[in-house]
Image (spheres, rainbow, N blue to C red):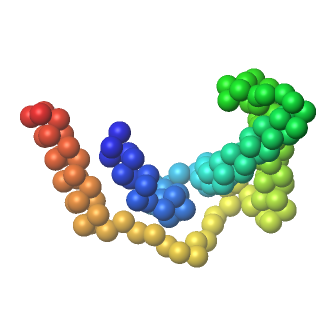
Amino acid sequence: IYLGAAFSFTTDMDLWLDSLEQNFHLPTVFIYGLRGALSFVPRVKQEIKTIRVAALMRVVKIAPYSPQLFLKSILISLRWSERLSTAMISHGFTENAPRTHFKEISIKKSDIFIAGILILLMQFSLLFF
């Protein structure tokens, strides 16, 4: 858990997704789906606050686990995702077309070596502690 938290707090998600696409050859559609989902997170948080304030103005208290809150936020997210896919298509995105990259990301041998050492150290620490 700590390793995952350290990775997620210290890594730029755009660079990580670019690396996954270029070096590990993940499908472009999957990468852009992750980018869209990550960009929706702050917007969904703000939308939930807006829904709660609107409900309070009608003197209705919505609990954090309320199905009404989930349904409204899911419907808004679906509308956003449809708009995003329409925008991508209108900008010429096609699923299996070859792509060029503005910034090429390469993995050096030293990066692979350091990652391997860290994994081995973690395994040994789990065995002996």
When asked about the image quadrant of residue 95, the answer is bottom right
In the figure, 106 relative to 89: above or below?
A: below
Q: Residue at x 20, y 43 (%)?
A: 122
Picture coordinates of residue 4, whole percent (x, y): 38, 45
Q: Residue furthest left?
A: 128
User: Residue 88 in the image: x percent, y percent?
Assistant: 78, 59
Q: Is residue 69 above or below residue 33?
A: above
| Residue at x 40%, y 59% (from the top left corner) | 10
Tell me the quarter of the image containing the N terminus. Answer: top left
**Residue 78, can we see it?**
no
Q: Provide residue 5's location: percent of width, then percent of height.
A: 39, 47
Please state the horizontal and vertical placement of residue 119, each as a whole percent of the image. Answer: 23, 47
Picture residue at 63% right of the left edge, 66% below the top = 99
Between residue 82 and residue 56, name the one nearer to us: 56
Q: Along the line of sight, which residue is nearer the eye, 79 or 31? A: 79
Q: Quadrant of the C terminus?
A: top left
